[in-house]
Amino acid sequence: MGGMRTAGDLVARMQMARGMRLDAAKKHVAGRLGVSERDLADPTVMWEVRAEFGLGRFDDQDTTFPGEAAAMAAKFRISEVLDVPINSAEQFARQAGLR
Amino acid sequence: MEERIPTRLGDGSYAELTRSEIRADVEAGNEAAVRRAKVAPLDEAEIDHLTDIYASPSRFTAVDIGREVVLSYDGCGSQCIGTRVNDLQSYEQMLGADLVELWHMDYCYKAVRTVLPHEQGAMKAAQAVLTAPVQYGAMPDLGRYTRPNGPCPNWSELMPLGRIDEARAAQEEAVEHLVRDIVLVCQGMAAAGADGFDFDTSGAAGDADLLAALTAAETLRAEFPDLGIEIGMASECTLGMHGQLEYRGTRLAGMWPHDQVKAAAQAGAHIWGPAVNINTGKTCAWNAARTVALLRRACEEAEIAVHPNVGMGVCGVPMTLRAPVDAVCRASRALVDLLRIDGL
């Protein structure tokens, strides 16, 4: 689907964590983000949506985002937005004394 | 005279066929699946669609906009440039992978168990810098437990001697070792932050190999309800190296895809990866038709995500180390268009 260029990583998370079939996973992610299911594979739309929700974006040579969530921070946001636990984020929070 | 179109054989080499010949191959592949696995045949519209895909001279073909599927990966990267974590970052940041997989060069759970702390360190490092899901993958690879390198008698040596009971007992003993290793490695990977586990080419050593994967999945699902478990298959029909093993009352030997996916779901897998092996002497069109016919019922009845394996030598992709993109995209499109799969 395009991974972090789009919402492919988010749909993949729903399949991994919940065993959802594709239509259900796309519907869940689109609903949580307020976009259409077609938008989920559209890098033009998802570029803005990922920024809005803090879900992490590519760091290209021309476009870096030091003030935005990335990697572990983005996973905290993804977990909250999709309402799905993310193992590494939970462990990070526990190890950092955040939970 | 009909135009001859460049297409490929299952060994990756080019062949020049007419559209009529390609359609005949599609029909023959379909018939081969029906005859062998007693599945329902493809209908005329499906045969027409497969013919259209394979009779196109285009370098590349793709699904319609809006029909994109998740791409899961086994074994991301070459492990030749930079670190393994760099490989995963490249797949995430440059290739746009939907999920990536950390793996060890000796791709089996028995080997990984001996270097588990090292693998856990790599997983933790990967999780710190990646946003996309990172799973850990390896093969069950039951044969690793046979002598002289493993603790169990070698059933492949015992069976030709007619020592069937001993061969079966050896496989049952090996299953216990393998389940223990898979569970131990995956528990370690979960502690290091993994998003899921991949049991790649389950059943490669036969029904006992698949039983180990299913048993390990069941144990891990009970402990980790939210982590991914992907059971990737080795073949369309599970080999009966043991012949009498069952999972939840169903015999594993001779199991076809529509029963494989049920067993995977019962065990707690969230993703099932079917594999239909290539006949290298037939065209990719023949192989794709056979694949679609063999997998259709499984895809219709699946209650978990289905990601057919479109790697080397399976599901319509030629048996060649450098799979031609024209063949890979045709196989991928055929599976998405005709089976409504959830990923590849």
Image (spheres, coloured by chain):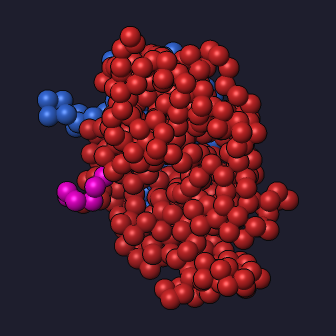
Chain colours: A blue, B red
Look at the picture and state if B161 lies above or below B193: below
The residue located at (44%, 24%) in the rendering is B54
Quarter of the figure that contains the N terminus of chain B = top left
- Name the spot of residue B33 as percent of width and height, x first: 66, 38
Look at the picture and state if B319 lies above or below B161: above
> For the view shown, which residue lies furthest in the left direction?
A62
The residue located at (26%, 38%) in the rendering is B94
Look at the picture and state if A2 lies above or below B207: above
> In the picture, residue B342 is in which quadrant?
top right
Q: Look at the magenta stretch and give its main secondary structure.
A: loop
Along the viewing direction, whichever of B86 and B6 lies nearer the viewer: B6
The answer to whether residue B69 is visible is: no
- State how many labels appear: 0
- Answer with left or right where residue B227 lies relative to residue B243: left
- Answer with left or right where residue B127 lies relative to residue B209: left
- Answer with left or right where residue B34 lies relative to residue B327: right
> For the view shown, which residue lies furthest in the top direction?
B1
Look at the picture and state if B166 lies above or below B189: below
Is residue B80 highlighted in magenta? yes
The residue located at (54%, 17%) in the rendering is B49
Is residue B89 highlighted in magenta? no
> For the view shown, which residue lies furthest in the front direction?
B1
- Name the spot of residue B145 as percent of width and height, x first: 56, 80
The answer to whether residue B140 is visible is: yes
The residue located at (57%, 62%) in the rendering is B204
- Name the spot of residue B206 as percent of width and height, x first: 64, 65
- Name the spot of residue B212 as percent of width and height, x first: 66, 67
Along the viewing direction, whichever of B152 and B198 lies nearer the viewer: B152
Q: Which residues are magenta?
A: B77-82
